[in-house]
Image (cartoon, rainbow, N blue to C red):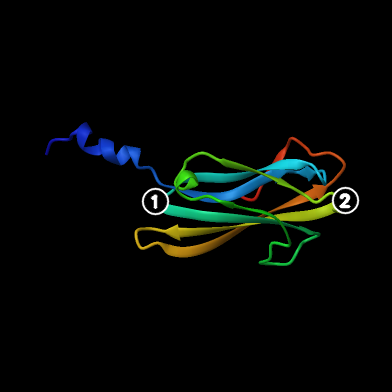
């Protein structure tokens, strides 16, 4: 049996990836935009990521809920199966009280060749404060 590099080249270009979590600053200042990092990594099959919705709730929030909607973003073919993080800008409302809170994001995706639908939710506990920190906190940590 002879091995041919040319035979595997088409497969090398078709990498698959999956969204694995989100990351946001540890401390966020209300009224100031901040970057939401959508974390990705290699995966065994194709995932068509359709959209992501992001919310905030004070304290521990309510399990399975986004809380106050901060934004939603179409991901589509441009941001599906990419092995690099995706960044979107969101803002906590200016009147948000300082203290502990939670940023939650839900991603709608279609898995595999049969496009099985899935909702995956990720959350990060944060502090609402007077300045936005540069240190990121990840849902996958």
In this image, 67 relative to 140: left or right?
Answer: right
State the image coordinates of residue 89 (x, y, percent, origin top left).
Answer: 67, 43
| Image position of 35 with respect to 92: above or below | above
In this image, 45 relative to 18: left or right?
Answer: left
Confirm whether residue 138 shows in the render.
yes
Q: Quadrant of the N terminus?
A: top left
Within-10-Å neighbours for mark 2: few <14, some 14–19, many 20+: some
Q: CA distance from mark 2 to mark 1?
A: 42 Å
Give the residue at x 69% y 67%.
63
Q: On the image, which quarter does residue 55 sit in?
A: bottom right
- Residue at the outermost top position: 5
Give the residue at x 77% y 61%.
60
What mark, if any, has residue 10 been given in the picture?
none
State the image coordinates of residue 54 (x, y, percent, origin top left).
Answer: 66, 55
- Nearer the viewer's eye, disc 2 or disc 1? 2
Element at badge 2? loop
| Residue with the mark numbered 1 | 44
Q: Earlier in the sequence, mark 2 or mark 1?
A: 1
- Residue at the outermost left position: 1
State the image coordinates of residue 109 (x, y, percent, origin top left).
Answer: 49, 58
| Image position of 66 with respect to 15: above or below | below
In this image, 120 relative to 34: left or right?
Answer: left
State the image coordinates of residue 84 (x, y, percent, origin top left).
Answer: 51, 39
What mark, if any, has residue 98 been given in the picture?
2
Give the residue at x 74% y 35%.
134
Element at badge 1? loop
């Amino acid at each position: 049996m002879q091995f041919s590099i040319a035979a595997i080249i088409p497969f090398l270009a078709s990498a698959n990836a999956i969204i694995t979590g989100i990351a946001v600053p540890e401390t966020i200042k209300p009224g100031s935009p901040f970057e939401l990092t959508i974390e990705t990594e290699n995966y065994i099959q194709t995932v068509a990521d359709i959209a992501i919705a992001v919310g905030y709730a004070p304290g521990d929030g309510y399990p399975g809920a986004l809380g106050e909607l901060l934004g939603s973003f179409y991901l589509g073919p441009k941001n599906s199966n990419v092995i690099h993080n995706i960044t979107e800008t969101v803002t906590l409302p200016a009147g948000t009280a300082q203290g502990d809170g939670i940023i939650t994001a839900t991603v709608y995706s279609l898995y595999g060749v049969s496009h099985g639908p899935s909702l995956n939710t990720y959350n990060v506990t944060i502090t609402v404060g007077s300045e936005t920190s540069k240190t990121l906190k990840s849902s996958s940590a």
